[in-house]
Amino acid sequence: MNTPNSDKQQLIIIGNGMVGHHLVEQLVERGATERYHVIVFGEERHLAYDRVHLSEYFSGRDADSLALSTADYYAEHGIELRLAEAVTAIDRDGSEVLTPQGRYRYDRLVLATGSYPFVPPIPGNDRDGCLVYRTLEDLDAIREAAETATTGVVVGGGLLGLEAANALRGLNLDTAVVEFAPRLMPMQVDSEGGELLREKIEALGVQVLTGRATQEIVDGEASRHRMVFQDGKVLETDLIVFSAGIRPRDELARDGGLEMGERGGVVIDDNCLTSDPAILAVGEVALWNNSIFGLVAPGYQMAKAAASTLLEGGMTFGGADMSTKLKLMGVDVGSIGDAHGDRTPGARMYRFLDPIKQQYRKLVVSSDGKRVVGAMLVGDNSVYDTLLQYYANRIDLPEDPAALILPTGGEAAPALGPDALPETATICSCHNVSKGDVCASIDAGAVDLGAVKGATKASTGCGGCAALLKNLVDFELESRGVEVDKSLCEHFAHTRQELYDIVRVEGIKTFGELVKKHGASHTPGLGCDICKPAVASILASCFNEPITDAAHIPLQDTNDTFMANMQKNGTYSVVPRVPGGEITPDKLVVLGQVAQKYELYTKVTGGQRIDLFGARLEDLPAIWGELIEAGFETGHAYGKSLRTVKSCVGSTWCRYGVQDSVGMAIRLEHRYKGLRAPHKIKFGVSGCTRECAEAQSKDIGVIATENGWNLYVCGNGGMRPRHAELFATDLDDEQLYRIIDRFLMFYIRTADRLQRTSVWRENLEGGLDYLKRVILEDSLGIGEELDRQMQTVIDAYECEWANAISDPEKLKRFRSFVNDARPDPDIIYTTERGQLRPA
């Protein structure tokens, strides 16, 4: 039996998961270690780790990189951490917990035991190769089993089930998902959304079987297992992973005689207290108001409330919003509030389905049409944040609520600025930080974004609120009369836009000259990882000199230094330019020969190019020598520059095409190749309004009409997709070039560093109308100047790889070790579908 510190009460926390660790952080932050000697028991041998990103364990991350803390953190604050020591019983009469190693007395006790995966009571569910998906040990077992398997099945089509399916797919198994309900993710999506989700998942090569109940699992004929369904049909597989939901780990509470819920879970009140006032419970083991909360954010809120209770504070837990924004196997899924509309009397629903772009949006409003009560999104979460603010803060709906989900005319949903949000608006759901909390931290002396983050922890979780938080902080500081420092970094007291103007007007062509004339006097002139690549981009945008020149190479990041994208195993990808996606058979043969010679993995990209992966650093010059000799140029896949111009076959081949989209795409790509910008730029050119090139999801979208070309601007895909907006119609070729020239140069002039055109457009005062006046009407009188700037860049174009391989000094950089010409011995490959990939 341990002997507690006589000066302190002893607090025991059972469970070292995400919520249990967050409780420790809250206690440390509030000074609880002055009052309590804290002992934390963890059943697993690992420190608390990030279960939200558990699937990344299969793509290179290890236990250390997923860990939420270190053993030193616990020791530093005097917290006794006992990993791989499971608590087996609670003796409430003696105020002790029992483990195989001994008995430990407590004054206060917190249950943070979480949950366990539910395995349906199917005969045969305990066969070898029948596993669960919950812990790192589970994932190790799945990886080991996959080494002798070719097929895998996940039982359960909910959130965790699809995560598990993605993991099996990543282990190169032919994967299927079996779900008892009639659709995937039945708690989050309705029948329309479920059907679209099914289509998207099946398009990724995963078989989806819904409405299937497994009756038994027996020996298979061709595979290890045979799953027999209720309708007599069967499915054979080598590996089965159960991910059919969770159940609270409440056996300690039940055996200890605490009040339990009818279906499990230890009952707690608003203070997170159980029926025993000495014992609290938080996270997925806790039942509050007859509800179990299976998300991390509510668990964090419980942890805060429990810490407050232990220190006799006033914070309580009053339930939590279960709205979720997810990306499952690359597919966006969002669910807000009463997404099904079945909990709100008289609820009205708006639906939007785009079967071509595979997007589904559903808006549920109150019976009087004044409030958002729920929403559902599949395939596009771009409007999630706006809808969540309307819902969470009961903000009055616009006159036409459908405008929130309908991409009318390419316009995005009406965004809510910081001034429109009430004090109660949640800014950071991970740490439950409201607008009021942010404002209070500013009133208490936080004078910049970093200080606000430190005071509130906002944007230190998943980071999804970073843009909203920055806008709010800037707005609140300016409204208090505080001048917001928009300096690029500590080395320059200027914004990126100001530095661009300085470089252009003064004709400054090197970083050294710029920092000498305009750098901050109190810092050394070496620069940093913020200003060096930003200035490198500005210099390239203005003068287009080779980035590998001696004056510019110290400014570049790794990808630009070696003019190739570094991959996770230390090799590089090679992407030659294929303008408009058009390529001759002879050039295809060359790419195949190069790939064979250097053992490169080949992949056709979404931008209609061929990507060659796995090139060793020392092989890059030889590879590019052969490609350039065959007529290829660098594709700038590594740079913040024009990437691709995607096209359909247009009027050349298609019976629906009305213009030569391929020819226009090639001309545009050659015109703007090498153009450096604040961020990458993508084009699309479609030969008719059927839009096969997906031009309306690009920074620059061009769509043919019978009268010329329609131009769309400021769209993008990625984590936050945005439809491009119609900018000009029925343009001839020369008009199209001139407008794009001016648009791109104005963007390069005025955008912030690493700012896509879509974000730049959203932050542009005056919006699209202002942009039209500047570009189409030349309201600022800078049109001809923008034309000249673009022509300067076009005239100065030179293939960067052709320049590099012609200079022996530049080639010296291409070796793995400065003092050794041998290749990197740590690069190891394995074979997959007939090609090499990182082991």
Image (cartoon, grey):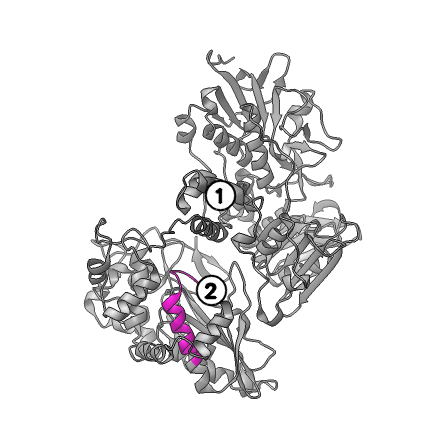
Q: Magenta includes 354?
A: no
Return the residue at label 1: 439
Q: Regarding mark 1 in the picture, which secondary structure is present there? A: helix
Q: Nearer the viewer, residue 740 or 633?
A: 740
**In this rendering, position of residue 173 left or right of residue 782:** right
Q: Residue lying farthest front?
A: 481
Whole-number angstrom distance, CA of label 1 to CA of label 2:
24 Å
Judge from the rendering whether residue 107 lies leftward or rightward of residue 639; answer left or right: right
Q: Position of residue 511 (x, y in %)?
A: 23, 61
Within-10-Å neighbours for mark 1: few <14, some 14–19, many 20+: some
Percent of width and height locating residue 163:
59, 49
Q: Amino acid at mark 2?
A: Glu
Q: Which mark is residue 765?
A: 2
Callouts 1 and 2 close, C-beta under 8 Å = no
Question: Which one is nearer the viewer's eye here, 201 or 396?
Answer: 396
Q: Quadrant of residue 745?
A: bottom left
**Against 746, is 719 above or below?**
above
| Residue plotted at (31% across, 58% down) | 494
The magenta stretch spans residue 754: yes
Mark 2: secondary structure? loop
Q: Earlier in the sequence, mark 1 or mark 2?
A: 1
Helix, strand or loop for the magenta stretch, by majority:
helix
Q: Position of residue 456 (x, y in %)?
A: 47, 39
Question: Neighbour class for label 2 at 10 Å: few (<14), some, many (≥20)?
Answer: few
Q: Amino acid at mark 1?
A: Cys
- Highlighted magenta segment, given as a residue range: 739-757
Is residue 239 in view?
no
Image position, residue 608 (x, y; %): 48, 73
